Image: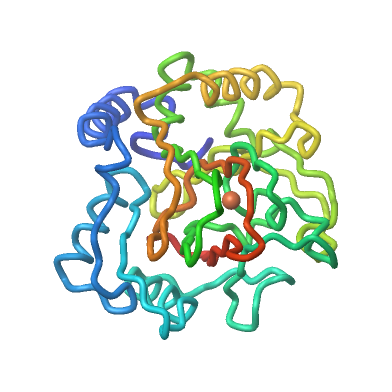
Amino acid sequence: MLGIVGAFALADRSAYGRWRDAKLESAPTSVGDLVVEVGDIADPTAAEHGALLDRVRRSNMAVYAGAVSLDRDDKAALKALGRRFGLTGIDANHLADEDGVTPLAVHREGTRARYIPYTERPITWHTDGYYNMPERTVRALLLHCARPAASGGANRLMDHEILYIMLRDEDPELIRALMAPDAMTIPGNDEEGMRRPATVGPVFSVDGQGCLHMRYTARARNVEWSPQAQYAATVLRRVLETPSAYCFEHILQPGQGLLSNNPLHTREPFADDPACPRLLYRARYHDRI
Ligand SMILES: [Fe+2]
């Protein structure tokens, strides 16, 4: 952990204490606190932009509630919104469209049917791109809902900085174990259409701007924990499964979306109506908001 200064340095207990207290005092404690009405997401007003940024600063996420317009290109609007928040480095996987945005819908056959995002099945706690190589770290995640599922399909959401606080307050050694460069190995696999090598890295890391990043999946069969991180991983899992005022659950409605710094999230199972199928657009960025 050499080189880390400020709140995330384990040795600096007073910087941590100040940051922690301020963070908890301003942290949203209900989904309603996250929602911002936006007239046109492709061109938010200064007030709308400021309100969204305020939520992201406080909790690494905001939910915008935009007007539904059937003759609009939702993907172009989503990318325009991203640009307003400084997001330009889009992370396209092989199943993304040409513009780098991935439409998420149920596929009952074909290539996509093999991958969980394209099914009705639940996706447990994770951050996006946990299997990516460091140069493709996903720091921001945008989701836009064109059509929700017939039932279900909520996202549970938790600011990874809050999880960091819960773990550090329990025992700073948990953080030390999760910041080790070999804490979490994701074995090589086939991820949404692309062969990729194994990736080894920490769960928590601090970027050049002093911002906390989290790389995580609770899918046990996708992860090899280092012996030193195994206990911390168990505690982390337990904390995520414990009800908390800082864990939100929300079903994105048509025109709504998530603007975020890739916090912890799930996707709950859902039932799709093939006559009116669920459709979400996902954009992942290497930049942070
Ligand atoms: Fe995700």
Residue 78 is situated, as x and y percent measured from the top left of the image, at 43, 73
**Residue 20 relative to residue 87: left or right:** left
Q: Residue most toward the left?
A: 47
Residue 91 is situated, as x and y percent measured from the top left of the image, at 60, 69
* The C terminus: image quadrant: bottom left
Residue under the point 34% across and 34% down: 7
Q: Residue most toward the front?
A: 275
Residue 243 is situated, as x and y percent measured from the top left of the image, at 45, 21
Residue under the point 61% across and 63% down: 277
Residue 284 is situated, as x and y percent measured from the top left of the image, at 54, 64
Q: In the image shown, does 150 or 63 lie closer to the viewer? A: 150
- In this rendering, the answer to whether 149 lies above or below 228 is below
Residue under the point 55% across and 52% down: 150
Query: For residue 25, what is the image quadrant?
Result: top left
Query: For residue 250, what is the image quadrant?
Result: top left
Residue under the point 38% across and 39% down: 5
Q: In the image shown, does 187 or 124 lie closer to the viewer? A: 124
Query: For residue 110, what is the image quadrant?
Result: bottom right
- In this rendering, the answer to whether 10 lies above or below 213 is above
Task: Please say which color scheme the image uses.
Answer: rainbow
**Residue 96 relative to residue 2: left or right:** right
Q: How many marks?
A: 0
